[in-house]
Image: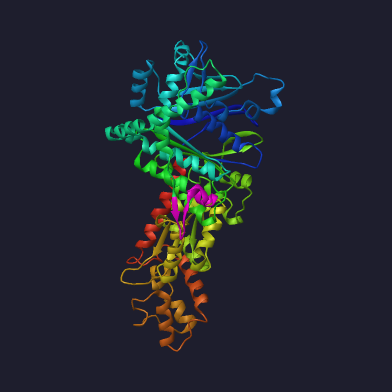
Amino acid sequence: MRLVSFTVENYRSITKARRIGLGSSTVLIGPNNEGKSNILRALVTAMQILTQERLIAVGAKGMLRFPGMRRIYEWERDYPVHLQDKNPEGNSVLLLEFELDEAEIQEFRQEIGSNLNGTLPLRIHVGGQKLTVSVAKKGPGAKTLSSKSAKIADFVSQRLQFEYIPAIRTATSARDVVDGLVERELQPIEQDPAFSAALEQIAGLQQPVLDRLSKSIQATLVQFLPAVQHVKVEIESEQRYRALRRSCRIVINDGTPTELQYKGDGVQSLAALAIMRHASDRGAGDRNLIIAVEEPESHLHPSAIHELRRVLNELTERHQVVVSTHCPLFVDRTTVASNIIVNKRQARPARNVREIREILGTRASDNLLHAELVLLVEGEDDRIAVAALLAHCSSRLRSALEEGILALDTLAGANNLAYKVSLLRNALCLCHCFLDDDSAAREAFARCRDERILTPAEVAFATSEGRKDAEIEDMYDPSIYAQMIQNGYRVSLDSAKFRSNKKWSRRMYETFKSQAKQWDTVAAEVKMSVARLVANASDRALDPHRRSPFDSLVRDLEQRLNALHNSR
């Protein structure tokens, strides 16, 4: 079962937001005070009513109640203030549309006694004194379905697990999230006969103490209230179970063992999400997990934000995540329509990356303004040569370059990799890297990988068979530029020094030196000249025996562009 859309009417600042589509990842973005947090909290209200409270039918008009209603919905706070005088009995309306698979359709027929076509739209009316859940379907069976609303809500709660992490993360709120997760993880052991026997033994030890307290209280009360006939102090079985489920603490040792509640807000947030991921990895039976996170970037160091983004991305592989955020790092760049723009109290899917940048106030350089994918290379000479080679080797990439969908940008040195990737992420660009296969580039990537900024799938190295270190120039056919070196610098590449297994720049250094020439003073000039010659002869510039890293790069970029296209 998955939640596929959500509609909000008359909840806080939102008077109407229709059919907000929800996928594996949904990101609510927009300026402050325009309603994205209120849309998220409306979703939280609806899901908590369905999944975290036992609905009890009262009366004959479909009215429902649950003990914690005031905790989840307060009319004075949650019904739009500007409508309260005009509509003193007004209700907030929350519509959830669920999608069921074939097995769940059969289970619904068996448990509820009604047929579905695969979708289950539930409309919740909630107000000061009213709570109803009805099936938002037309036709003769709609009334019958709505009369079974309590059973249907229970059907949903058995198949969905919902968690909410608010933006204001006090120690209490973080502990509540953790306690709830621990409670659900511990519940299965309650079916163990040994656990039940132990609990009965505890109850047996407690009962004499409770009986003595009951008699003592009764003896005292009778002196003041002669009509009192009996007093009983008891611990209900459910309360005893609940106490054992929630009586836990989490101690984190990062040099000093400290209870989680005394750690910083950022650590508490990450701990809660880590436990959620654990619950997800173990599986929650057949239940889908829906996580709503308000401003996940709050209280976190930038490096922790990258880690949190990775955790949330992992969760979306199996479950659903809804996030409200101001941070570009949490924007879904793979499926642009998964980003819901909330502006002027309206909500709609984003149409393109440019309007997401505008709403978040992020900027991209002119050459990256329309880019959906940016290829990072180390220097300007690499950019010139690689762009021409990509255009020649792939019509798909040539079109993407011409349309500005694919762009190339430079690092000005491998040490700038982390900085440049972070800038691109903030500008809402997907990035791919093509780097020299030398110690500087490998170390730069290792730092990015450790900081969760880049993954191995986003990086390609210009490897060269038989060479420990290599550079992009090692892929080029020397015949393209040998004459230019001879004419311009009086250096012949027909030399044993140049045919060694060292990387290109080292071979050039030793070749120049062996012929009484300086390399360091002309290196940048030569590299640029070589790049221009490669660009002008892109049809024959790659060495047939050493071009495989470039061919792999072409395939990677085509696959990433195809994935972007298919996600629209």
Q: Residue at x 50, y 27 (%)?
A: 49
> What x and y, as percent, mark residue 499?
34, 78
Image position of 157 with respect to 414: above or below: above
Image position of 303 with respect to 112: above or below: below
Q: Which residue occupies the extreme front position in the image?
A: 223
Which of 247/532 is in front?
Answer: 247
Q: Residue at x 49, y 43 (%)?
A: 175
Which of 288/243 is in front?
Answer: 243
- Look at the image and say whether residue 255 sits in the magenta stretch: yes
- Look at the image and say whether residue 91 sits in the magenta stretch: no
Examine the image and state in which quarter residue 94 appears: top right
> What x and y, as percent, mark residue 91?
61, 21
Question: What colour-coding does the image apply?
Answer: rainbow
Going by the image, does 293 lie left or right of 155? Answer: right
Magenta segment boundaries in residue numbering: 251-270
Q: Residue at x 60, y 44 (%)?
A: 355
Image position of 156 with respect to 260: above or below: above
Examine the rendering and report whether any part of residue 568 can be seen.
no
- Quadrant of the rendering where the N terminus is positioned: top left
Q: Which residue occupies the extreme bottom position in the image?
A: 516
Going by the image, does 93 lie left or right of 236? Answer: right
Examine the rendering and report whether any part of residue 221 can be seen.
yes
Which of 413/308 is in front?
Answer: 308
Q: How many marks?
A: 0
Which of 53/25 is in front?
Answer: 53
> What x and y, as percent, mark residue 554?
40, 56
